[in-house]
Amino acid sequence: MISPLGALVLSFVALAVLRIPIAYAMFAASAVYLWTSGQDLGLIVDQTMNTLTSLYVLLAVPMFILAANVMSAATISDRLWAAAEALMGRFQGGLGHVTILVSVVFSGISGSAVSDAAGPGMLAIRMMRDVSKYPAGFSAALVAAAATIAPIIPPSIPMVLYALLSGASVGALFMGGIVPGLLMAGSLMVAVALVAERRGLPAGRAVPMRAVVAALGGALLPMTVPVVLLGGLFSGIFTPTEAAAVAALYSMLLGIVAYRSLGLRVLSAVFLESARQSAVVMILIASAFVVNYAITAEHVASDVAQLIADLRVGPVGLLLAINALFLVLGCFLDASVLLLVFVPMLLPSVRAAGIDMVHFGVVVIVNLMIGLITPPYGLLLFVLSALGGVRLSDMVREVWIFVIPLVVTLLLLSLFPSLVLFAPRLFGLVS
């Protein structure tokens, strides 16, 4: 007879294969577990409601989602693109560099890879494909790769969720993502430069200095958002959770007062969409808590920790093994499942190995972001194929150009913890 844990795994796999939404699949699998183990199904309500209502930091998630949606609706993407194009567009393959630069700036606003791809990413695809005649697959693949930077450079929704699981400082995680995010951007720019030279990608138009100054002036206010957030965080004016609310309010003030692009009708649509997206994320988190209850009750985490301890691999070996495992799993599983279900199972082993929780968190999130662009289950590939009208097969052929430099960056972050911990140590957030 199959064990309750086996029933959970088999039911989840079956529902995932049937393309049932991940959150509903986890709820249903958890119900199967409780039923087969003879426990009260009311535990689902008890576990989710008691846990969710006690986690103050979760308020940051809907606020960051609202901020990203407001910035997308307030013509912010167009202004950022114009400034980046004025600076970088004149070089060979310049629009590719512009795409990466815009993603870096937007990363300090949105905290979400999908928001980055669906916001300024769609403008980037249109400019590269229709204006400069870049191959459609290359354009969309680059946008997908650049969007992975968004949850690494603060603010970051995945980092908030990881902090809930690990107890790590949200501020330290935010600070720890700055250098890795810039390294990811640099590696992608090297890849674009090499491809541009080999394929003869065209340069953009040279912009007169007066126009450069005007474009930078138009993007000045949006670029102050990350400054306000990080400055407030690390000066102690507000907490990471309060920073999310500040970002949302500041974004609305820009759209309403500075740019006059947010009317009542647009704002209503933004609030409705933000509420819908927030509900999706919260349902996913709630379902993960129930699965984690089953994993804890079955002693899976402690068994995994003991198994790894028996292997007697050092901290570096453990981190490399986890990276290899997640890179493979990321090709087939949703990043949220890996973060909310698999990471908690590994945390005891990581702590026992003496790996810093902030270092591990940033490395894992970079790994999960790479999974968003690796086929066959690359969420960003599906999103951009649907929104941009680009054939998925064309994107898959091109995306490996960008997966390789991102994996190299991941390896460097794993081998050299100081790349992650330098900034948090500088501000006294980690010892």
Image (cartoon, rainbow, N blue to C red):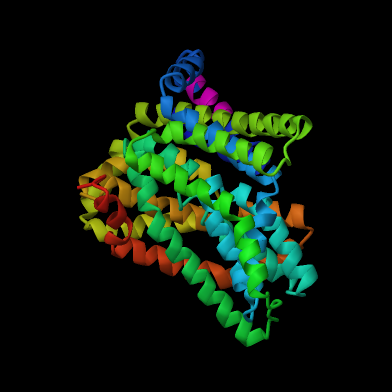
Rendered view: 56 above or below 325: above
Q: Is residue 62 visible?
A: yes
Q: Is residue 386 left or right of residue 359?
A: right
Q: Is residue 275 magenta?
A: no
Where residue 415 appears, as percent x and y from the top left, is: 30, 64
Observer-nearest residue: 240 or 419? 240
Most foreground residue, 353 or 276: 276
Residue visible at 46% across and 22% down? 52
Query: Which quarter of the figure has residue 394?
Result: bottom right
In percent of the image, x 71 and y 56: which residue is there?
A: 122
The residue lying at 61 percent from left, 36 percent from top is 253
Instruction: Give the answer, above or below, for where 177 lies relative to 95.
Output: above
Asked if residue 334 shows in the view, the reply is: no
The percent position of residue 417, horizontal first and vertical second, equals 28, 59
Please give the name of the residue rendered at 68% of the width and 80% of the height, measured from the top-left corner.
203
Residue 30 lies in the magenta-colored region: yes
Start and end of the magenta stretch?
A: 26-35
Asked which quadrant contains residue 202, the reply is bottom right
Q: Is residue 420 above or below residue 188?
A: above
252 vs 58, left or right, is right
